[in-house]
Image (spheres, rainbow, N blue to C red):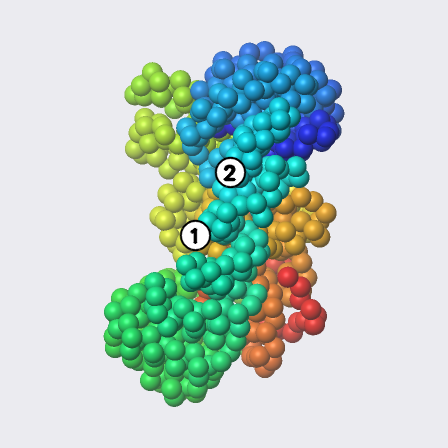
Amino acid sequence: MMSASYHKITTSYHLLLGLVLSASVLFTTTHADAQLKPTDKAAKDYRQARRLIEKDADRAFELAKGLPKFRYADEQRIELVGQAALSAGKAPEGVEFLLDFADRTDSFRSAYAARLDAAELLILLGERSRAESLLEKLDRDHKKLRGRYSTRRHLSARAIRLRHDLAQTANNDRLAKSLATELLVAFPNEDATRRPGLAITPDDLSESRRFSRARAFYRAWAYKDARAEFERFLDDSSRKETAKWHLAQIALNKLRDDFPKAEEYFEELAKGGRYAQESLYQLARAKMRQERYDECLSDLNDYVERYPRGSRVELVYYYRGWLPYDHRENDKAIRELKKYIDRYGRRGRRSTYIYGFLAWTYMRESRWEDAIDAWDDMLPFGNPLVAGKAYYWKAYAQIQLDKKERAIDTLDTLRKRYPLSYYGMLGEQLRAKIEGKDERASKVWWPEGAGSYDDKPRVEIEDLNTGRLTAGEREQFKRVKELAALDEKRLARQELSPIYNSVLRTAPSSERDEWIHALGFLVDDYNKMWVSGARGSISYLTPVPDDNKLRSVMAYPRAYREDVDRVAKEFGLPPYLIWAIMRQESRYKPSAISHTDAVGALQMIPKTARKVAKDLGIEYNPRTFHYPEVGFRFSGFYMRKLLDTFGGMFTPMAGSYNSGPQVIARWFRRNPEASFPWLIEEFEYNEGRAYSRKVTEHMTRYIYLYEKDPEVRAKLLDKMYPLSRDIDLPEDVGY
């Protein structure tokens, strides 16, 4: 795969230096020094040249030119020299290096991108015939492009735009218009299309092509543009149904900015047609977002009557219990929640929530014995946030019945099964209260071994016996190691992926964890490390104290440490918070994309990212946002803003990162008298409630593993599990 520097090159023709600088990427040296011998000057010079491209292009060029040939990753050396040449304003040399790189690389996409960059520079240099020759080859080859969808589209659009511009300068109007049409219809949101100077405008397109353009905007997450295009077809008899469906989805689920309009469209669509069933369900949700409780329930009941086997029936049963629960209609809530349990028992997708709602409704009513029975019904779920919750609140209910000894027994079980979990820590505070001791989180029980965990690799990669690999696999693994030494971790991950299992099989079975851990650090693949250490469970908690400390650090890796530390320092954040959110959001995967279009290891939706970019005064580029060295800074700024908003309390800050600060602020204002633990349980959204508790739990575990300073630990814990929920919330919480 082409490195990040090629993927970031823009299509601006007016300033070569601007072209080059926009292509530059900040490269870090995370873990690299640990992989290199002190005498490996070439690798160090390579990394230095990468870092200097933006700051001192001439020096970067001289360093790059002086590099010896690499044995297994020489194409990266060639690319670096070419990129440094471009940055230093030495375009002719840059072209030749780009073409040399394209001829040498084994990656089709890398070669494609290099030739595309060379063609663009040749146009800038006035060498039209060479540029045309390159673009003809790219036109023949573009269907072979593979890899990340956004990158493929970016490269394809750039190639088409260059061909279009050459056609214009050659007065080939027919070809130029054809290529402009392709850009406007298939790639409407790409920079290559948005740049002025196309041979035609959107108004020149046929109706069918204009409709395809609307769909392309929608697929590219450009929802405002999609909305403007779809609204053109509201009076089109053949297309208005599909147009209204997309407009309703944008208003309710994508931009979430016009619930009445979503209701209007879904109501019409629900009357019949291809979208009728889903529209009726979404109609209820649109009314739910407008807090029209009775009308929402009516639509949900209508859904079950019209579609008794519909795909949303279980969700309808869920909402018919949750809505009265949310509105504190406790008697009605109990009836409807029991209907869900009678129908689905513990096998339903929302069963854990329903059982919890039922138990909590009894708590609201001070029906302590019923609550204890309901909490007992939750224990078989066996999860820190379900069973742990049951133990904690069962103990609370027992205290209300003056059964303090039984409460202590319940809390003993909680400590034994779920130490250092969210409810485990609350349980320690509750125990202290019963015993008349200091209830602050920093003063309650804390297990031995804190801060003693070391996440450095236990084995040396060079010690791995690769004799069982094929000759080709051995060569590829050597390339992986050399790329890692150059700090080209993304490329190293991609090279390792197809041979990962083969490499792992060469390791002794007794050392499997050690090698998974070492390989993860080698290429920054913390997800595979986490899967092995946490057994694929987001709620998995390693034993405390832990005889197998390696498993613990694999389950809670300090992923992308240098990037995290840099962002934490800039915005005054504990790095444990960033790792905890990363664990919850993506399981440490920088390429993750959620169902809400959130991107990256720290999962930020484009709408929020654009706001942050404006506040920071930097560019938001969706093609590079998933890079940790890029996206983490956006998230760090946002975390800092949220943490300040909620008085430095980490749990509501985490909830606001997931659900939005406006939602969390409303949650606080609706429950002015609730204690902090009670307040969390009353939070209206399941996802946000679970998210805030899980992030706090992950952060607790990170602090236990890695924080050696008891004073730092104490300050963090007291903000994670506060005794008071007093927060001076601003009127406008922003975002």
Where the C terminus falls, by quadrant?
Answer: bottom right
Residue appearing at x 67%, y 44% in the figure: 619
Which of these two is toward me, 432 or 339? Answer: 339
Q: Which mark is residue 182?
A: 2
Amino acid carrying label 2: it is: Glu
Amino acid carrying label 1: it is: Pro
- Nearer the camera: disc 2 or disc 1: 2
Q: Looking at the picture, does residue 505 appear above or below residue 537? A: above
Q: Can residue 191 be spotted in the picture?
A: no
Q: Spatial distance from mark 2 to mark 1, Cα to Cα?
A: 61 Å
Sequence-wise first label, 2 or 1: 2
Answer with the quarter of the image where residue 647 lies: bottom right
Q: Looking at the picture, does residue 64 appear above or below residue 271? A: above
Q: Looking at the picture, does residue 715 appear above or below residue 183? A: below
Residue appearing at x 50%, y 63% in the figure: 234
**Element assignment for label 1:** loop
Residue appearing at x 30%, y 33% in the figure: 509
How many discs appear? 2
Residue 76 is left or right of residue 281, and the answer is right
Residue 138 is left or right of residue 468, and the answer is right
Q: Can residue 67 be spotted in the picture?
A: yes
Question: Where is mark 1, residue-wise?
Answer: 545
- Residue 559: percent from left, percent from top: 52, 42
Q: Which mark is residue 596?
A: none
**Element assignment for label 2:** helix
